[in-house]
Amino acid sequence: MRDLENSAWQHSMQNAVRSVSELLDCLGLRPEDFPSPIDLENPFPLFVPREFIARMNHGDPTDPLLLQILPTSDERVQTPGYGHDPVGDQHVERAPGLLHKYTSRVLMIASGMCAIHCRYCFRRHFPYEESPRSNDQWQPALDLIANDPSIHEVILSGGDPLSLGNQRLRALGKSLESIGHVQRLRIHTRFPVMIPSRVDSAFCDWLASSRLTSWIVLHINHANEIDQALIQAIRAMKRTGASVLNQAVLLRGINATVALQRDLCEKLVDVGVQPYYLHQLDRVDGAAHFETPTPVGEQIVDELRKLLPGYAVPRLVREVSGEPHKTVLR
Ligand SMILES: *Cc1c(COP(=O)(O)O)cnc(C)c1O
Ligand code: SF4
């Protein structure tokens, strides 16, 4: 039964587009339509599900969804101040796959796999192959959590934790539920955005039945990403009792204007999702062409505050390695 329910999203993963020429064919575009040459040899290859391509504008080389996933030669530019581990993740790994950076919560690199390859991803160089792959391999991390009563929240992140099947999520959840001082489970995921059918009944049943209070943090950067299928998935998650938040990354040429951020935030609150963080780009090698100057981000959020209810305005943050929390700029 569970395998049957999983099969729709697993099929979408298998059927995702991995070839630039196929992607351009789908959109009626040619390589020469883009200002920078397309990079066919990038070690972080193209990966995009058809459900997401369907939300791109046909024939538009500046489409804000397309620009998040198309590898170009801009990524080959070496920029001072950019590196492989911009947020100091590798210094806070306390057990395989377990990052303990902030008080009261820990982050598990639950999977190295995602439902999309975002070109600006701050973990694009993360050594996922060293993270646990089976629930047995999670034991040292689980022991560490069990022995530290100051930890009240576990964040499943990655990669994308929803790339694990429901059975593995359920097993991991069960181990966490057995630790009395863990109260909350947070899931950082882009899966429901890319492949809404991932929010299947087995996943929702698991959320609804857990002792832990669940907080789901989506990653949506542009209003065009929100279609009917995603809205249905959000409603299904909310019916389980989970709270649903969003984090976005401020990206030059994609969403870095007041009008676009207003559209995004309004659409999010219309469907019951609260904008949580708007991130200044993490300075990861290959992503410098996406960076927006900090004053631009600050100005955008100042303007949003005049236009929207307080709950619809995200906090503008930057992650500074070694700080005890994300740095709130606005
Ligand atoms: C961002 C992050 C968190 C969560 O921070 P919040 O401010 O609670 O959202 C936790 N752990 C790590 C390693 C992080 O990078
Ligand atoms: S979904 Fe998240 S972790 Fe995966 S590539 Fe995109 S930004 Fe990176």
Image: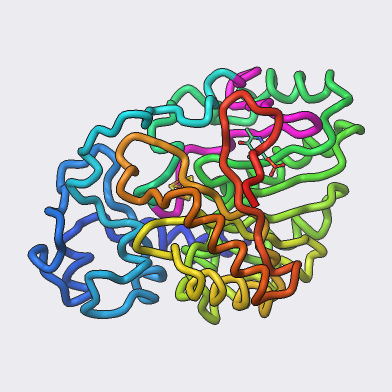
Main SS, magenta residues: strand
Magenta stretch: residue 96 in it? yes
What residue sits 36% from the left and 68% below the top? 64
Task: Using the image, determine if residue 177 lies above or below residue 256.
Answer: above
Q: Position of residue 149 (x, y in %)?
A: 88, 25
Residue range highlighted in magenta: 92-116
Q: Residue at horizontal 61%, vertical 71%?
A: 265
Q: Position of residue 142 (x, y in %)?
A: 74, 25
Specify the color scheme: rainbow
Residue found 70% across the figure and 38% down from its top: 172
Q: Is residue 228 above or below residue 273?
A: below
Q: Is residue 55 left or right of residue 300?
A: left
Quarter assignment of residue 115? bottom left
In x, y percent, where is residue 131? Answer: 52, 26
Q: Quadrant of the N terminus?
A: bottom right
List the single residue furthest toward the left. Answer: 32
Measured as percent of width and height from the top left, residue 180 is found at: 91, 33
- Describe residue 124's horizontal placement relative to residue 19 as left or right: right
Front position in the image: 209 or 90: 90
Q: Answer with left or right where residue 44 lies relative to residue 249.
A: left
Ligand 1 shows up in the quarter that is top right
As for residue 26 lying within the magenta part, the answer is no
